Image: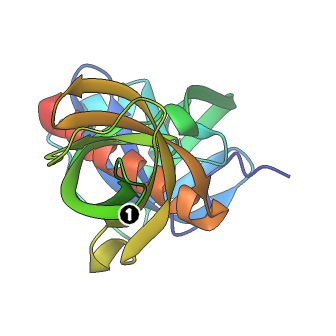
C-alpha cells in the first residue's frame, strides 16, 4: 500500500500562500491534524498566520503532494511548546508532481565507462548537472558519446546522501560535444529511491531559495 500522508519525523514545508514557506517536522498526527515543530521561525505575524488558509507540501510514495488546511488556533495558543503548531487539514493529498519527474540542478562528480571504437572500455570523469529518478544531464565529457550508447556510471552523492550510486544509462540526448542526457536503464530500486529523494530535497531548497 502506498504511503500518502506524512509520518512522525518527516520534514515538510508549511506554506503561507504568496508569503513564505517554513520548514517544519511532524511530531504527532491524528485524525484530521498534524502537530508540526517549527524548524524555522515564521516571519508572518501570528494574527495573520492564525487566520490564513495554509498548505503543507511533502513527499510521499507518489511524489510531491500538497494538503490544505488552517492552524488549530486554540491548540496553537494553548500549547505547551511555543515552537509547535497544530495544522488541521482537510481533503485528500493533491499530487503536484510524480516522483520520477522531480528534477534538481546539481553538481555531482561521476565516472562514466563506455566502449571506444575498438570496443575497449574507456572511463571518463564528468559531472551530473541535472538529476531525477529517471536520468541525468552530464557535463564535462572528454569524448562525445553517440546517441543510444549505453554507459556504466558511478555517481558520487556525498557522504551525507549515502555515498555513491552505480548503474547503467543510455544516451538519449546530445546537447554539445561535452554534454549529454542519460536515461537510467539499470539501477537498483533502493538507489533509484535515494536519487528521487535527493532530487526532491534539492529541488525543494531551490524553490524556496528563489521563491
Q: Quadrant of the C terminus?
A: top left
Q: Is residue 38 visible?
A: no
Report the coloring of the rendering. Answer: rainbow
Q: Please give the name of the residue rendered at 25% of the width and 19% of the height, measured from the top-left corner.
A: 18
The answer to whether 193 is drawn above or below residue 157 in the figure is: above
Asked whether, in this view, residue 70 is left or right of residue 50, the answer is: right
Local secondary structure at mark 1: strand
Residue 196 visible, this angle: yes
The residue that mark 1 highlights is 121
Instruction: Tell me if residue 161 comes above or below residue 76 in the rendering.
Output: below
Query: Is 46 in front, or is 30?
Result: 30
Residue 81 position in % (x across, y down)? 37, 70
Residue 52: where, in percent of width, then height?
37, 25
Q: Quadrant of residue 114?
A: bottom left
Closer to us: 193 or 59: 193
Please identify the quarter of the rendering in which residue 159 is found. Answer: bottom left
Image-based side of 157 in relation to 40, left or right: right
User: Which residue does the image show at 34% across and 52% down from the upper left?
Assistant: 116
Pick out the residue farthest to the top: 18
The location of residue 35, given as percent across then percent down, is: 52, 58
Amino acid at each position: 500500500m502506498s504511503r500518502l500522508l506524512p509520518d512522525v519525523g518527516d520534514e515538510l514545508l508549511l506554506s503561507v500562500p504568496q508569503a513564505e514557506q517554513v520548514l517544519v517536522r511532524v511530531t504527532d498526527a491524528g485524525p484530521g491534524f498534524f502537530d508540526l515543530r517549527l524548524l524555522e521561525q515564521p516571519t508572518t505575524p501570528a494574527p495573520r498566520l492564525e487566520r490564513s488558509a495554509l498548505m503543507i507540501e511533502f513527499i510521499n510514495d507518489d511524489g510531491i503532494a500538497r494538503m490544505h488546511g488552517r492552524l488549530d488556533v486554540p491548540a496553537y495558543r494553548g500549547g505547551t511548546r511555543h515552537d509547535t503548531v497544530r495544522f488541521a487539514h482537510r481533503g485528500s493529498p493533491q499530487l503536484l508532481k510524480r516522483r520520477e519527474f522531480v528534477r534538481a540542478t546539481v553538481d555531482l562528480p561521476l565516472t562514466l565507462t563506455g566502449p571506444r571504437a575498438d570496443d575497449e572500455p574507456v572511463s571518463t570523469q564528468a559531472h551530473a548537472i541535472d538529476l531525477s529518478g529517471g536520468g541525468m544531464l552530464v557535463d564535462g565529457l572528454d569524448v562525445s558519446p553517440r546517441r543510444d550508447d549505453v554507459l556504466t556510471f558511478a555517481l558520487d552523492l556525498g557522504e551525507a546522501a549515502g555515498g555513491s550510486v552505480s548503474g547503467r544509462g543510455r544516451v538519449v540526448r546530445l546537447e554539445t560535444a561535452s554534454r549529454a542526457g542519460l536515461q537510467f536503464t539499470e539501477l537498483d530500486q533502493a538507489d533509484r529511491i535515494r536519487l528521487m529523494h535527493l532530487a526532491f530535497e534539492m529541488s525543494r531548497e531551490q524553490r524556496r531559495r528563489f521563491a
